[in-house]
């Protein structure tokens, strides 16, 4: 039981302020500050030794900051020195926090050399970055900027303690300059920075060091439902509709209507259909321009392809009666490949009393007609799946969604009343009640035309099988995004990052499911 509770900490993200409050509770309960630092730093030292054993690396440079991140660095310096590593410190600060100063004194007494000139670390084989952790709030200046500039030019592996120095823990913003790490060993609990796209190239590979923060202290500060959550494999598995009930039938396994495609973007419709197919949805119906029907039937023989009247240029001109019988569906997804000509389709679909996913041209039309503010009047939930460009068009007043993406997506969901999935290297999904789900890993192999279409179909098919409250829906959307990313990772492992075209991606989706 206790093990399961600890495992749950894997999916929680805390801000710098929450981390400080959690730490405060632990200290108030009697844990000495020095003892907590010792626990965290010793485990970090063990991880460093696993990554870079003494047999491979001996000269290690350690950067020591003025606060407790610097304190951790000094404990690590002491431990590695005692294990036989050849340690030298870079410590340019004259004023250190008291505990950090004690550790500096002790390191000095052990004969560990310390410099104020970064150039003297140039011959090290490994650098450990303990300049700043979550205590950094104002931009770096002066010699620290110069030192980090030099360091970032060297080709020496860097391990950052807690976070790469120079980044803001919550937003991932670069405060002046930041260290580019090879690995970042996150102390205790995940922080938002690990899920902000703008920080990823500084973080390198991220690992969490669990040094025994009591679950009750986390729960006391971060109440359920957790405002920021990681969609882990365990949570994804819980949501997938597996195993199926023995006596189910196709109409019970989700009924999805896709409205997509045009003469120009016929492929978008196929890819959306293939994403939906992979979800296992019971009944897939697709409304497409009539001239596309033979093509769609040849790719998706199991789907009910509903031909719709089309414009001269091959966009859907109106929904046929069959596609308009909305009692037959649990959810509608609309947008991929429609073109901007399908304006009336998107306007009309908004009044349908079913959960609705809007993507691609569905979003562009919504933005053009300034209809986002009307979404809160819909009787059923709405799910918007923009990439950054679409997000900016939909929510032009939300400041720099390319910066602090987590705050941006949260605000968009609260303002619009819709579930918003903001695509990116770390896709974020927010619901209007303030919960944000984050997808912990993905691959740049997915940065290719059409991979978003596959995602739209997958989301539609998955949530059609398990729709319910907005909380359940947003978890379903997040599970689909996780599944999509995992398929990309698996395909990239087997075919390289260049081998994951959207069609191939769709064929890897079932293999992720098979891994359960
Ligand atoms: N929570 C936990 O569970 C545990 C946390 N632990 C560790 O504690 C770390 C947090 O430590 P922290 O609070 O001392 O802050 P930290 O990141 O070292 O930096 C703040 C220092 O930098 C200074 N400073 C700020 N800006 C500056 C600037 N621009 N230029 C120059 N100086 C600047 C600032 O000075 P001041 O603002 O007071 O002038 C202050 O002295 C955390 O990341 C983790 O490693 C573990 O030991 C144990 C378990
Ligand atoms: N650098 C990246 N790392 C991980 N995933 C990415 C990256 N770039 C794009 N993606 C993913 O690829 C998909 C692209 O979707 P989108 O831009 O809508 O493409 P399209 O409209 O051409 O289908 C999204 O799921 C997004 O999260
Ligand atoms: K650091």
Image (tube, helix red, strand yellow):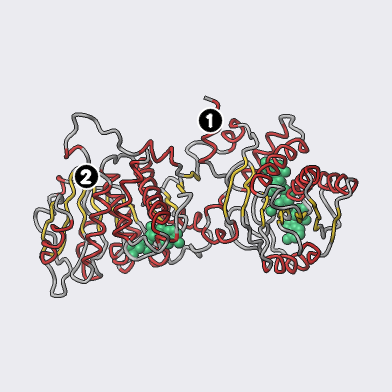
* Left or right of 209 on screen, residue 147: right
Viewer-side label of 2, 1: 1
- Vertical placement of 239 versus 263: above or below? above
Tell which of 510 and 454 is nearer to you.
510
Residue 212: percent from left, percent from top: 64, 34
| Farthest residue, direction bottom | 312
Is residue 459 at least partly visible in the picture?
yes
Some atom of ligand 1 lies within 8 Å of the CB belonging to the residue at label 1: no
Q: What is the secondary structure assignment of the residue under circle 1?
A: helix
Residue lying at 13% horizontally and 75% vertically, measured from the top left: 312
Which of the marked residues, 2 or 1, is nearer the chain's N terminus? 1
Tell which of 416 and 253 is nearer to you.
253
Dividing the image into four quarters, tell me where ligand 2 lies: bottom left
The numbered mark at residue 5 is: 1
* Left or right of 489 on screen, residue 195: right
| Farthest residue, direction top | 1
Categorize mark 1 by other alpha carbons within 10 Å: few (<14), some (14-19), many (20+).
few
Some atom of ligand 2 lies within 8 Å of the CB belonging to the residue at label 2: no
Categorize mark 2 by other alpha carbons within 10 Å: few (<14), some (14-19), many (20+).
many
Residue 408: percent from left, percent from top: 48, 58
Residue 192: percent from left, percent from top: 56, 51
Is residue 423 at least partly visible in the picture?
no
Quarter assignment of residue 259: bottom left
The numbered mark at residue 330 is: 2
Q: Quadrant of the C terminus?
A: top left
Residue lying at 25% horizontally and 54% vertically, measured from the top left: 274
Whole-angstrom CA distance, mark 2 to mark 1, is 35 Å
């Amino acid at each position: 039981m206790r093990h399961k509770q600890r495992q749950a900490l894997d999916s929680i993200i805390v801000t710098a302020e929450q981390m400080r409050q959690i730490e405060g509770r632990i200290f108030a309960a009697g844990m000495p500050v020095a003892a907590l630092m010792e626990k965290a730093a010793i485990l970090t030292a063990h991880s460093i030794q696993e990554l870079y054993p003494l047999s491979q690396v001996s000269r290690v440079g350690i950067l020591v900051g003025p606060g407790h991140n610097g304190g951790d660095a000094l404990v690590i310096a002491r431990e590695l020195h005692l294990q036989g590593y050849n340690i030298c410190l870079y410590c340019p600060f004259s004023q250190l926090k008291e505990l950090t100063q004690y550790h500096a004194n002790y390191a000095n007494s052990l004969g560990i050399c310390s410099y104020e000139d970064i150039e003297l670390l140039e011959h090290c084989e490994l650098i450990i970055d303990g300049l700043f952790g979550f205590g950094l709030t104002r931009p770096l200046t002066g010699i620290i900027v110069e030192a980090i500039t030099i360091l970032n030019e060297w080709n020496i592996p860097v391990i950052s303690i807690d976070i790469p120095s120079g980044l803001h823990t919550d937003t991932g913003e670069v405060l002046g300059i930041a260290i580019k790490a090879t690995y970042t060993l996150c102390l205790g609990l995940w922080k938002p920075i690990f899920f902000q796209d703008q920080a990823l190239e500084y973080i390198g590979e991220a690992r969490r060091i669990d040094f025994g923060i009591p679950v009750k202290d986390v729960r006391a500060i971060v109440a359920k439902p957790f405002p920021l959550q990681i969609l882990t494999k365990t949570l994804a598995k819980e949501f997938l509709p597996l195993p199926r009930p023995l006596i189910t039938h196709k109409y019970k396994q989700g009924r999805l209507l896709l409205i997509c495609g045009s003469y120009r973007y016929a492929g978008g419709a196929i890819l959306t259909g293939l994403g939906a197919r992979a979800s296992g949805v019971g009944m897939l119906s697709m409304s497409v321009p009539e001239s596309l029907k033979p093509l769609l039937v040849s790719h998706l023989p199991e789907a009910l392809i509903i031909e719709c009247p089309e414009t001269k240029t091959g966009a859907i001109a109106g929904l046929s009666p069959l596609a308009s019988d909305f009692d037959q569906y649990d959810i509608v997804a609309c947008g991929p490949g429609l073109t901007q000509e399908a304006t009336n389709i998107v306007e009309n679909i908004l009044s349908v009393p079913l959960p609705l996913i809007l993507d691609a041209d569905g979003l562009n039309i919504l933005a053009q007609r300034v209809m986002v503010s009307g979404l809160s009047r819909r009787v059923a939930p709405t799910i918007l799946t923009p990439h950054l460009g679409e997000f900016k068009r939909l929510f032009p007043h939300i400041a720099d969604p390319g910066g602090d993406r987590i705050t941006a997506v949260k605000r968009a969901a609260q303002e619009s009343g819709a579930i918003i999935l903001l695509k990116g290297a770390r896709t974020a999904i927010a619901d209007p009640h303030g919960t944000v789900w984050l997808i912990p890993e993905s691959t740049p192999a997915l940065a290719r035309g059409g991979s978003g279409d596959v995602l739209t179909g997958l989301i539609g098919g998955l949530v059609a099988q398990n729709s319910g409250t907005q909380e359940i829906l947003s978890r379903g959307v997040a599970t689909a995004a996780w599944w999509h990313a995992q398929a990309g990772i698996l395909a990239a492992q087997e075919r390289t990052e260049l081998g994951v075209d959207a069609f191939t991606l769709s064929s890897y989706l079932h293999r992720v499911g098979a891994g359960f």
